[in-house]
């Protein structure tokens, strides 16, 4: 098995909490990258994700790239 490059699965979703009501909704990573502006499906307020969740995910991937723990990777994709 050859994997020269590790990438975040663009069909993966992140639970983004609404700053107003705290409702978490699953947002596609690919959508978050293109447009971090979200509308809460619970209270319909609009907010922009600060990217903290995505940053955290990217950091995990960077770490995995170095250590190549495929089992850990499978757990978060
Ligand atoms: Zn909300």
Image: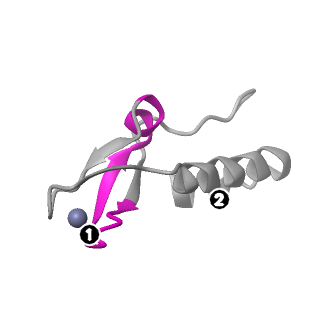
Question: Label 2, on which residue?
Answer: 71
**Ligand 1 - quadrant of the structure image:** bottom left
Quarter-of-image position of residue 40: bottom left
Label at residue 13? none
Give how far across and how far down residue 55 sits, in percent: 62, 50
Q: Is 57 left or right of 15, judged from the image as shown?
A: right
Towards the viewer: 4 or 31: 31
Give how far across and how far down residue 21 sits, in percent: 25, 72
Mark 2, other Cα within 10 Å: few <14 / some 14–19 / many ≥20: few
Towards the viewer: 38 or 55: 38
Mark 1, other Cα within 10 Å: few <14 / some 14–19 / many ≥20: some
Give how far across and how far down residue 43 sits, in percent: 14, 63
Residue 15 sits inside the magenta stretch: no
Residue 21 sits inside the magenta stretch: yes
Quarter-of-image position of residue 22: bottom left
Q: Which residues are magenta?
A: 16-34
Question: Dot 1: what SS?
Answer: loop
Residue lying at 71% horizontally and 51% vertically, measured from the top left: 59
Question: Label 1, on which residue?
Answer: 23
Towards the viewer: 19 or 10: 19
Q: Residue furthest bottom?
A: 22
Residue lying at 21% horizontally and 56% vertically, measured from the top left: 45
Question: Dot 2: what SS?
Answer: helix
Ligand 1 closer than 8 Å to the CB at disc 1?
yes
Q: Is 28 left or right of 44, judged from the image as shown?
A: right
Quadrant of the frame with the N terminus: top right
Residue lying at 48% horizontally and 34% vertically, measured from the top left: 33
Spatial CA span between label 1 and label 2: 30 Å
Mark closer to the chain start, 1 or 2: 1
């Amino acid at each position: 098995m050859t994997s020269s490059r590790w990438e975040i699965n663009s069909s993966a979703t992140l639970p983004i909490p609404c700053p107003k009501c705290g409702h978490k909704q699953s947002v596609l990573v690919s959508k978050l990258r293109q447009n971090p502006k979200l509308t809460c499906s619970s209270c319909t307020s609009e907010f922009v994700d600060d990217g903290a969740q995505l940053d955290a995910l990217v950091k995990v991937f960077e770490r995995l790239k170095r250590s190549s723990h495929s089992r850990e990777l499978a757990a978060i994709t």
